[in-house]
Image (cartoon, helix red, strand yellow):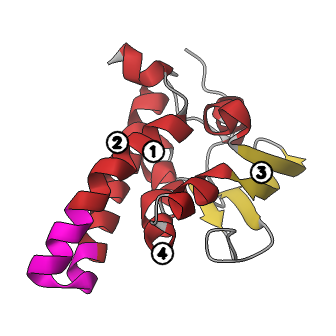
Amino acid sequence: MSQIQDLPILERRRIEAMILKHVFDVITERAGRAEAEAVIGETCSRSAIEQGRQLAEGLGRDPDLTDFAAIMPNWTKEDALQIEPLEMTADRMDFNVTRCRYAEMYRQMGLGDIGHLLSCNRDGDFCIGYNPDIELTRTQTIMKGASHCDFRYRMKPGAQTSKKES
């Protein structure tokens, strides 16, 4: 498993997409596009939640947005995302993505129309496993044709944001 964890996430998503493309095609042929999108979306959602859970387990406490910012290099590795930071605190993390190689890769693979299922939708789902008190608001994505993605993460009101004592 550690060899997989050592791969940049961009490369992991490429490998996943190569397989999921065929799964998507088979489900589309058998049950229609809507069902294929639902299955791929649910599959990627479950995967994102599990990955969030796994990353949070190592902390021994509920992660906050400072912890989240510390793991961001996992997604930006090898210039996979170009980010314009706006605000980073324990309660709020705002940034824009101005270049997304994930979107570029999916388009090159002929999967641009389902790239949001393969990557974008994972962002909020990851929080469910990592810390369900973290909420993501995003109104636009490069994947869907916008000039940038507007990520706005918040700790839910009343959420514990101070580090817990061991």
Question: What number is the disc on residue 93?
Answer: 3
Q: Which label's residue is closer to the chain start, 3 or 1? A: 1
Q: Where residue 14 appears, x then y in whole percent?
A: 45, 44
Q: Amino acid at mark 4?
A: Asp
| Element marked by disc 3 | strand
The residue located at (52%, 22%) in the rendering is: 59
Return the mark for residue 110: none
Segment tinted magenta in the rendering: 23-36
Is 68 located above or below residue 31 in the figure? above
Among numbered discs 2 and 3, the one appearing first in the sequence:
2
Label 2 or label 1, whichever lies nearer to me, is 1
- Asked whether residue 52 appears in the rendered view, the answer is no
Amino acid at pointer 3: Met
**Which residue is drawn at the image coordinates 39% and 16% (left, top)?**
3
Mark 1 falls on what kind of element? helix
Residue that numbered label 2 is attached to: 50
Q: Is residue 134 above or below residue 71?
A: below
Instruction: Report how far apart the C-alphas of labels 2 and 3 lie in the structure.
Output: 22 Å
Camera-side residue of 127 and 98: 98
Q: Which mark is residue 14?
A: 1
- What is the x, y in percent for residue 78? 69, 31
Quadrant of the snapshot with the C terminus: top right
